[in-house]
Amino acid sequence: MLLSQTITSDGRHAAVVRQGTEAHEIEGVSSTLELALSCIAAGQTLAQRLQTLRPGPAVDLGAALAEGRVLPPLTHPDPAHMLITGTGLTHLGSAATRDTMHKAAALDQIETLTDSMRMFRMGVDGGKPGAGRVGVQPEWFFKGDGSCVVPPGAALDAPPFASDGGEEPEIAGLYVIGPDGAPFRLGFALANEFSDHAMEKVNYLYLAHSKLRQTSFGPEILVGPLPADLRGISRIRRGGQTVFEQPFLSGESNMSHTIANLEHHHFKYDQFRRPGDVHVHMFGTATLSFAAGFKTRDGDVFEIEAPEFGLPLSNRLTLTDPATAKFVAVQAL
C-alpha cells in the first residue's frame, strides 16, 4: 500500500491511497498527517483505519505529478514542527571499501583509519544488537525544518555560497509524534538528501554545513516494513540524456545498522518526541555521483527510483550565481 498527497484539479488538498495501479482519494481526509493522527486517536493501524473510510474519486498520480500537483507525502501546516534529519555511514558500501576495512583490521591498524572509517566499523561491529537492545549510535545530522523540503518534481536550489550540489539517493522514515510523546512511523519513502559534497571534502568538520540544504522525498509512502534487500537506481539526466547511472542498495541486508537502532538513537532525545511534530529521518546511502568523480551542472535532473515505492523521485538542480551571495550583518539592539 502506498500513500501520497495531491492538490486536486479544483485546488483541494487530498490524501491518496494506492493499491497496485489503482489510486483514489480518501474521502474526507485532506492530508496524511490528518490520517495518521486519526489512527493514533483510534488505536488503529493505517490499514485498519483505511478500512473504515470511504474511497473518494480516482486519481491519476502520473498526471498529477507531471502537472506539479503532487506534494511531499507527509507535511505539517507549521514547517517549524517538521524536522528533517539523517544518519550516515550506515550502509555496507562497495566491496573495495569493505576490503580496505578488513585489511586494516587484520593488520591491527585501526588507529590509522579515518574517523569516518572508524564510525563505519563501529556500525558493522555493533549496529545490529538484536530486538529490543541498544546498539552503537550512528553519525547523525540535521538538515532543517519543513521549509527546506521541496515537492517531488520541483527544483533543488543550491545557495550562492555552495561549493557544489549533489544527490544522495536514500530511504527516509516518516514519523508523527503522538499526544503522549510516542513516535509512530507511517512508512518509508524515497529521498534525495541533497548535499554539498565538495564543501564536506575540504574538511570533515564542514559536514554540518554541507547538510544544510534543501531536500525532497516521495512521491509516495510505502506503508509497512522496509524490504530487507532493496535495490533501486540513481541517475542524472542532462539535456534529456542519461549522463550518470548507478544502482543503490538499501534495506537491513545492505546496512550495518538495523532500522530500529537508528530510530532509537534519534528518538531517544526528549526534544524529538514533542507531541504533534512530524519527522523525516534519512537512513544513509553508499551511492554518490560525486564519489564517482561526476560533476553536476545547473539544470541537471536527479532521478531516484525503486519499484516498491511507486513513482520515481525527480528534481532539477538549480545553481545560484555566487555573485549574488551577500554578507549577513547582525544588528545590535
Image (cartoon, grey):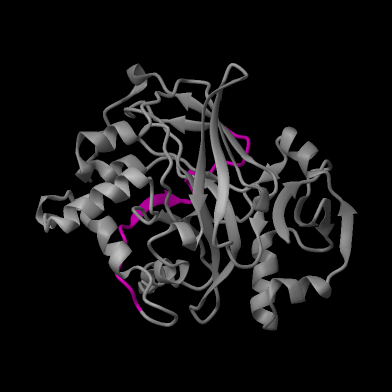
From this viewpoint, is residue 146 visible? no
The secondary structure that most of the magenta stretch takes on is: loop
Q: Position of residue 162 (x, y in %)?
A: 34, 29
Q: How many marks?
A: 0
Q: Position of residue 8 (x, y in %)?
A: 80, 45
Residue bounds of the magenta highlight: 134-154
Which quadrant does the N terminus fall into?
bottom right
In the displayed structure, 48 sits above or below 107; it is below
Residue 321 or residue 222, whichever sits in front: 222
**Residue at the image point whose x is 73% and y is 48% from the top:** 6
Residue 101 or residue 61, whichever sits in front: 101
Q: Position of residue 150 (x, y in %)?
A: 55, 41
Quadrant in which residue 107 is drawn: bottom left
Horizontally, residue 260 falls left or right of residue 142, namely right
Quadrant in which residue 269 is drawn: bottom left
**Residue at the image point whose x is 32% and y is 40% from the top:** 210
